[in-house]
Amino acid sequence: MKKLYGKIIAAALAAVTMLSACSVSAFAAQKQQAVGNIAFGDVNKDGEVDIDDVTLLQKYLAKYPEVVELFENDDHIMFAADFNSDDKVDINDVTAIQKSIAGYDYEDPYDPGEVDPETPADIWGHTEPDGTYTIDNIRDYIVGLDTPVELEDGTERPLINFDNAATTPAFTSVMDAVNQELLMYGSIGRGFSQKSNHSTDLYNIVRQKVLDFVGASDSKYTCFYVNNTTDGLNKLASALIENESDIVLTTRMEHHANDLSWRERCRVVYSEVDEKGRVDYDDMERLLKEYRVKYVAVTAASNVTGFVNDVHRIARLAHRYGAKIIVDGAQIVAHREFRMTGGTSYSDIDFFVFSAHKMYSPYGGGAVVGKTDLLEKHMPEFYGGGTVKIVGDYSVTYKDAPASYEAGSPNYPGVIGLGKAIDVLSDVGFEDIQQHEYALNRRLIDGLRELGGDNVVVYGDPDDISDKVGVVTFNFKNANSYLLAQELSKMGGIATRQGAFCAHPYVWRLMHIPDDTLDQFDSCGAMNTPGMIRVSFGIYNTEEEVDEFLRVLPEALAKVTTPDYLKNYGNVRIYY
């Protein structure tokens, strides 16, 4: 009845609009429906459907407390905000109003006969009920999964991608969300247009989504966008380090991003790992007692062994000795649920840095979540538009965080993709992801041991894999890892990673390579530089793919150990 009556009034409104000047477009007039004195889309009840309504609706979706309260206490506002009459107020209403103001022709997706079940949902997942994405069906939502690659023998097959710790393919819904929102893309923050307002609002909605994703209250934390984890750690280090004498405590497990970012700016002390490669918490506390540490920088999960660190335990240690904690979250965000809070203030994380391309949104996005009061005490070494309130000939006044950390035009596709990736991962559920990765890890490790016996070295702790994300590294004692990884790709279309994975000191320790011998080696990508083979799983990988890997592996291993093959490569060295 509501829609039928609305369509009758819409026709009359359309005729009026054609005859008179009005701030609402012809499209808006056609869509505007009235019941009593309330018009759909006229959220603030000022008699017009305009950008003010969009702003109010966006604030509601962004959970501004005073606006949420306004909506909840006024049924007329909630009713008017349901612009597309689907009985809910969500981002689709924002998009429809924006398109009406911009003069787009509008087709109501909720009219009978116009619903396309294959149409991608909006970027917030509101047209996708909970449970749309699961471990069992996630392969249906991965871009390029069935794209064939050519093998050495000329045949083609889809790639088996076991290199997800480096980067991940896109979710189809991430790609669709980015493409959809580019239609309404405008300059962020400083433009005067419907598209600019729309883009700015979504940009800020994702910021809140990031905070929610890691359990960070916006009364205590904020987040700023970065290009990737390395960019975020460097930007954070440029802001936090005030003097070369500042001391940062990190571990020998770290990726270079969480080592060199500090090493190049201040004094760094390193906590050792144990014989398996796990963080030594006792050694960490010893260093905290011995040095006046300002920051503790530690990875949440290793990209080499997959070990997951107890960062809340480390936070308690850091805070006990007056330090702040910075967590490199690159290898955790797509694998385990992460929370900034740890039960007490002493257990809370101060800063958390991660990349979207590790979580199925390879558009160059990422974020740093940090305590607002700490961020506002510092400025990164990145200056320019967007960071300032006003600039004079010899004076400048900067904005507060997060704006002060976001110089220049932002990466809008990266932000949109990040927001949608969060939705998909949350829908799949991290408990299911963890169980799935455990099964893949166990199957691969057992298969390697059965195949290789004493000839295979599985790094880390192949027996206790309870504290691992989906990463397995190994070597065969009779094979050069560079050549073996190469043949796995050429013969089987299997993507692995070979080398030291931008975590050289950690790899050298696990392989027992003395530090004073490193000058004899070429770059980390060279054939005769020590390295491992890494298999790293994504949520879409299957046990069948593990079995295919274990089928191809003996063939590749036999090939790279034959004299006729090796003579083509000269002096081949083997390290394990």
Image (tube, rainbow, N blue to C red):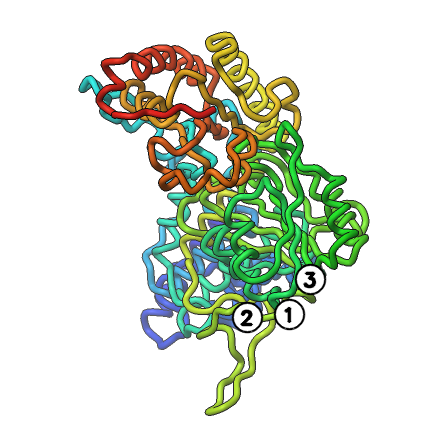
Residue 65, labelled with which disc? Answer: 3
Kind of residue at badge 1: Glu
Percent across and percent down for residue 520 are 40, 39
Q: Which one is nearer the viewer's eye here, 122 or 83?
A: 122
For the residue carrying disc 3, how many other residues have a C-alpha within 10 Å: few (<14), some (14-19), or many (20+)? few
For the residue carrying disc 1, how many other residues have a C-alpha within 10 Å: few (<14), some (14-19), or many (20+)? some
Position of 408 compared to 282: left or right? left
Q: Residue furthest left?
A: 154
Q: Which residue lies at the image location 69% right of the left edge and 62% below the top edge?
A: 65
The reply to whether callout 1 and callout 2 are in contact (CB within 8 Å) is yes
Q: Which residue lies at the image location 70% right of the left edge and 39% below the top edge?
A: 310
Q: Which residue is mark 2?
A: 404
Pointer 3 or 2: first along the chain: 3
Kind of residue at badge 2: Ser
Kindly report the distance in space between the C-alpha atoms of the residues bearing marks 1 and 3: 23 Å
Which secondary structure lies at badge 3? helix
Kindly indicate the quadrant of the structure image that contains residue 145.
top left
Q: Which residue lies at the image location 42% right of the left edge and 58% below the top edge?
A: 412
Which secondary structure lies at badge 1? loop
Percent across and percent down for residue 232 are 52, 56
Pointer 1 or 2: first along the chain: 1
Kind of residue at badge 3: Pro
Q: Which residue lies at the image location 32% right of the left edge and 69% below the top edge?
A: 18
Closer to the eye: label 1 or 3: 1
Kindly report the distance in space between the C-alpha atoms of the residues bearing marks 1 and 2: 8 Å
Kindly report the distance in space between the C-alpha atoms of the residues bearing marks 3 and 2: 24 Å
Which secondary structure lies at badge 2? helix
21 up-or-down from 118: above or below: below
Residue 43, labelled with which disc? Answer: none
Q: Which residue is mark 1?
A: 376
For the residue carrying disc 2, how many other residues have a C-alpha within 10 Å: few (<14), some (14-19), or many (20+)? many
Tell me if I can see residue 275 in this picture. Answer: yes
